[in-house]
Image (cartoon, rainbow, N blue to C red):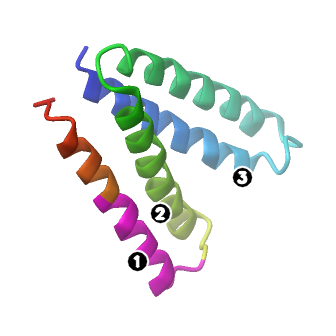
Amino acid sequence: MNAIILLAFAIICEVFGSTMLKKSEGFKKFLPSIGVVIGMGLAFYFLSLAIRTLPIGTVYAIWAGAGTALTTLVGVVVFKDHFNLKKGIGLAFIICGVIALKISTGQAH
């Protein structure tokens, strides 16, 4: 499977796990707590597959940056977290950084 697709799965699973972490209320709710374990477990599994063919620094930066941006958006949409200009600028910097790292690898993935 394409390493970029594996990385995308890792990001989606990490965002799911983080969302379930919020829903678990400090691991007090059973099903969301199971969601944390499954989401994070799958995230690290897919991440480990992606770093077999892509540079680890780039993969981790994309995973962390995209995961942060998507988790922030989930917080705003699902949990009604406050969104302001500073948060928007921060997310823009993360996205620009991820793009720069991807370009710097020189790979056509």
State yes or no: discs 2 and 3 in contact (Cβ < 8 Å): no
Q: Which residue is mark 1?
A: 89
The picture places residue 47, in percent across and down from the top left corner, at 45, 24
Q: Which mark is residue 49?
A: none
Q: Secondary structure at mark 1?
A: helix
What kind of element bears circle 3? helix
Name which of mark 2 and mark 3 comes first in the sequence: 3
CA–CA distance in space, label 1 to label 2: 13 Å
Q: Residue furthest right?
A: 28
**Quadrant of residue 3 in the image?**
top left
Give the magenta range.
82-96
Locate residue 46 relative to residue 102 in the image: left or right.
Answer: right
Q: In x, y percent, where is residue 6?
A: 34, 24
Q: Which residue is mark 2?
A: 73
Inter-mark Cα distance, 3 to 1: 24 Å
25, 63: nearer the viewer: 63
Residue at (21, 35) in percent of width and height: 105
Quarter that holds the C terminus: top left
Whole-number angstrom distance, CA of label 2 to CA of label 3:
14 Å
Q: Is residue 100 above or below residue 61?
A: below
Amino acid type for the residue under numbered disc 2 = Leu
Q: Residue at x 53, y 70 (%)?
A: 76
